[in-house]
Amino acid sequence: MKLLRVLRRTYRSLYARIALIYLASLIAMSLATAWIAVGQFDQLGREWLQRSQLDLAKNLATVMQTPLEQGADSAAAHRAAERIMSINPALSVFTLDEHGLVVAAYNARGCGLGANIDTAPIHQLLSSTPMLPVYAQMPCRDNDNVFSAARVTLGADHAPGYLYVSLEADTHMSMVGMWQTSSISRSLVIAGSVALALASGVGLLLFALLTRRFSRLTRAVQRFAAGDYAQRIESSMDDEIGRAGYAFNDMAATIEAQLDALSENDRQRREMIANLSHEFRTPLTSLRGYAQQLGNDMSPTDLKHREQLSAIFANVDRLTRLANQLSLLARVDVSDRPLNREPFSIHELANDIVGKFRPRAEAASISLVVTSEAGLALVSADLELIDRALTNLVDNALSATNAGGDVTLSISRESPGLQICVTDTGIGLAKEEIPLITQRFYRTAGSRGRGEGNGLGLAIVAEILRRHDTRLVIDSQRGEGTRCRFTLSSAESI
């Protein structure tokens, strides 16, 4: 299976595709060349035969002319032709009239007599500079072949005609036959095979050198995409690949500079938020103190002013919580600050948080409990941040639950760690609100109606869990409550 994956990955590579196309093209060209070469060898053999026998008919005409004057089909003409074919049995001799009609066939079977032969090839062969090979119809065969011809006169009236000699060329031979019987052909086949092997090897090597630069460029882009923004490509060649490398280096430098600028802007933003939240605390503390002093000096019967003073206290508390949340968000947002991981009991932390919120739950007639399996392992996380995340989740659950409802903080095993859930029986969330609930400063319709919250609680929880390589999962349905859950790695698995 591993080998199959390697082969599939190799096939998908640029080098494999180029090599496959190159080898297929090279083999196809070699086969086409071999096929053309065999055809040319056949034609070359016919040309050589016709060229070497070009004057054969002319020479035979000196022997046949006198008998032909007695008649093309006379006994004297047949005897003269038989003497010629006894010397060279491969020849077939015919006499044609000036229109190409076979008037005499000097072979044992007498085939071809009465056939019509096109005289154009004969005229071409008898021209001063014929382009060989010249093919013409064979009287005793259905195919064309090379021949030799000479002008003669026939009969006592000396009618013009032609002595037509079929050379019976059969030079066609398969490649296997050429390999077995021709040393020249064998040498050519060996030389062609060696040339094919060398061309394949050199081509594959050159393609490997070419695609290696593509691979280097691809690896650099992949490392850059993985977060190595200092990645650059060294290239000394000013070709397409080299220019692509230069363009990548310019792009990488621009992106790295922009990321540095964004990082600096983000640092300044976090610093400004932290400073502002810190600066808010002093006037808010002073405002609370003055409000308390006014309350102490106010008459118990002055109900109107006491109601206004209660509104001042409520808004001071709200602003104080917002300042604290902003300060925490600024601290959590520092992604380069290492987490202070330590092993601790999530069960004990859950009980501490529930104990902190129990008076509020009892005052609102809400049942707040912790459930956990026995013998749970310790978790490894930043205790302060997980404390804040659970506090926010329980706080939100209590705010969303009406009197008589339940809020449960449960802990269970989930490989390779523990799952922590905060479940309430409150008003729940609309389906379209769930993806938005962890965005900063987003407030649900319910919280806006109650005038509660600042839209940072769940955003802080989501950021804390992201820093711990886990995520917040929210399951909710309008009118049926909400379930928020996440997992933490056990200390034993770290």
Image: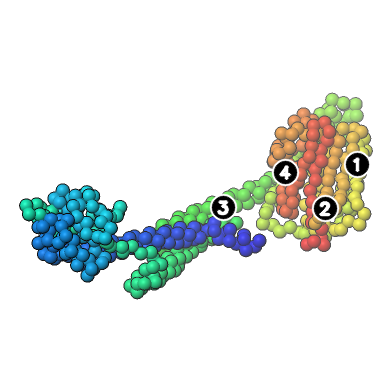
Residue designated by label 2: 414
Q: Residues within 10 Å of mark 4 (few under 14, many from 20)?
A: some
Going 41% across and 69% down the picture, which residue do you hit?
193
Residue 75 is situated, as x and y percent measured from the top left of the image, at 16, 60
Q: Amino acid at mark 3?
A: Leu
Q: Indicate which disc residue 368 carries.
A: 1
Between 478 and 440, the one lying in front of the other is 478
Q: Pointer 1 and pointer 4: residues touching (CB < 8 Å)?
A: no
Question: N-terminal of the two: label 1 or label 3?
Answer: 3
Between 48 and 360, the one lying in front of the other is 48
Going 83% across and 35% down the picture, which residue do you hit?
481
Q: Secondary structure at mark 1?
A: strand
Going 77% across and 59% down the picture, which residue do you hit?
341
Question: N-terminal of the two: label 3 or label 2?
Answer: 3
Q: Amino acid at mark 2?
A: Glu
Q: Indicate which disc residue 459 carries.
A: 4
Residue designated by label 3: 259
Residue 100 is situated, as x and y percent measured from the top left of the image, at 18, 50
Q: Amino acid at mark 1?
A: Leu
Between 199 and 246, the one lying in front of the other is 199
Question: N-terminal of the two: label 1 or label 4?
Answer: 1
